[in-house]
Image: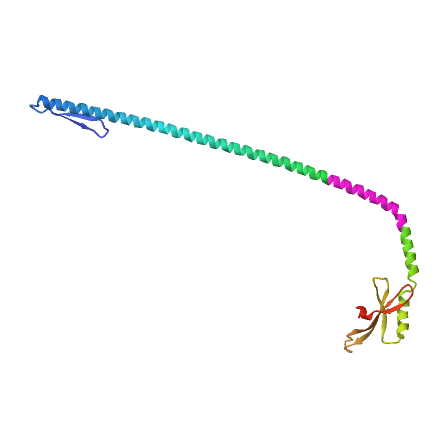
Amino acid sequence: MMEVNFDASGDYVENINFVDNASEEQIALLQNQIQEQQKQLSDLEQQQMEKELDDYYAQLEEDRQKEEEAQAKADAEAEAQAEADRKAEEERLAEEEKKQQEEEEAQAKADEEEAQADSEDEAQTESEPEQEEDTEAIEEEETAEQTVSQEQAIQLVRDQQGISEDSPLLVAYDHVDDSGNYIIHVYENVVDNEETGEGHTATQGWYQVSPSDGSITDVTLDGYQ
């Protein structure tokens, strides 16, 4: 009787053991078993081949997809770089145009200022004689208007208030107000500490003297005290 087995690789191995007195029926059954095992082996080989083909085609498809993705990525990166280069060039051209425009505006402004300065110089040159005449006229008018000097204004206040030269009251010119009148300050120095000589001034009054006619107005209550 013959026995059929498979090894670890899937190949079948025939181990034939002859048994004495085997019948024809047993031999036929054994032959059927061998044929069936051979058929199964053929199916396994076919399945293995189909699996290998499937794996091969799957690998090809995966490689193709990877190649397409890599190409698409490279195209996208190239397009992005081209777009970035285009924008950079546009910005550079815009910056150059802006700079040129600013330079033209600055030059135009400088030319305008220079022309204006030349015009002002010409006008100044033409007006200098007139200004000199006006200045002289103003000085003459002021001289005519100010018939009373500061010293005379002080003396007028001293005479009006009856303040003698040896009086402890002091009469001094302080300033000219907005109307051009002399403001005369009448005050007394008060010694607070005889050892140090420190003290303060005690205001007696403020007087407004007109430089044109010498009239005196007491303005002590008008904020000068």
- As rendered, which of 208 and 174 lies closer to the eye? 208
- Which residue lies at the image location 55% right of the left edge and 32% below the top edge? 82
- Which residue lies at the image location 49% right of the left edge and 31% below the top edge? 75
- As rendered, which of 112 and 168 lies closer to the eye? 112
User: In the rendered image of this protein, does residue 213 appear above or below residue 2?
Assistant: below
Location of the N terminus (image quadrant): top left
Counting from the top left corner in percent of width and height, residue 166 is at 88, 76
Residue 145 placement, left or right of 38: right
- Asked where in the image residue 142 lies, by quadrant, the reply is bottom right
What's the magenta bit mostly, secondary-structure-wise? helix
Residue 50 placement, left or right of 197: left
Counting from the top left corner in percent of width and height, residue 164 is at 90, 75
Residue 33 placement, left or right of 205: left
Q: Which residues are magenta?
A: 106-131
Magenta stretch holds residue 36: no
Location of the C terminus (image quadrant): bottom right
Visual colour scheme: rainbow
